[in-house]
Amino acid sequence: MGSNVRLMVIDDEPIVGKRLKQVFEKMGFEVEAYTNPRIAIEAMGRKPFDIVVTDLKMEDMDGMDVLTKTRQINPDAKVIIITGYAQPETASEAFREGVFDFMVKPFKLDELKNTVCKAMKTIGNSS
């Protein structure tokens, strides 16, 4: 399904990245998971990712920073922010900044899979 689509997962909880990496690799995506957003951004600069799934609240750099940096490095990448700390203002700001979707934890894994698949369908199309 996701063949040749590069997916990056950034979450400061290693278990989240590990779990999502397994799920999306099974779906055929090429996945890299990071717990440190700064290292993830460096990796993004070396080779582009089509879809970035990032946590909002992390030490050092938050999901909004990741969104901004991703838009600078690869404006076509689809960014999905996941968070347990949803604030309507943050979601609004994320959409203004070009986030593909903003998902509140806890969510069902199928919801995230569906969102990633929707993002994949828009790759190569201007959204």
Image: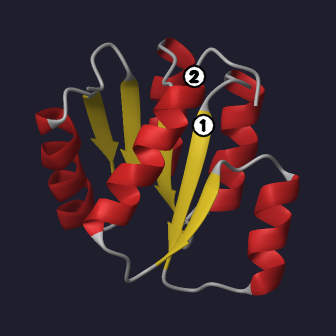
Look at the numbered disc 2 and give the secondary structure of its residue: loop
Is tag 1's residue or tag 2's residue first in the polypeptide sequence?
A: 1
| x and y percentages locating residue 39 in the rendered image | 45, 38
Q: CA distance from mark 1 to mark 2?
A: 8 Å
Query: Can you tell which of label 1 and label 2 is closer to the viewer?
Result: 2
Tell me if 1 is positioned left or right of 45 in this view: left
| x and y percentages locating residue 116 in the rendered image | 43, 44
Q: Quadrant of the C terminus?
A: top right
The picture quadrant where one finds residue 107 is bottom left
Tag count in the figure? 2
Residue 123 is tagged as: 2
Q: Is residue 17 above or below residue 93?
A: above
The picture quadrant where one finds residue 81 is bottom right
How busy is the neighbourhood of tag 2: few (under 14 within 10 Å), some, or many (20 plus)? some
Q: Nearer the viewer, residue 35 or 20?
A: 20
Instruction: Evaluate whether residue 125 shows in this view.
Output: yes
Name the residue tied to disc 1: 78
Q: Is residue 74 above or below residue 14?
A: above
Contact flag, marks 1 and 2 (Cβ < 8 Å): yes
Q: Residue at x 57, y 22 (%)?
A: 123
| x and y percentages locating residue 13 in the rendered image | 29, 68
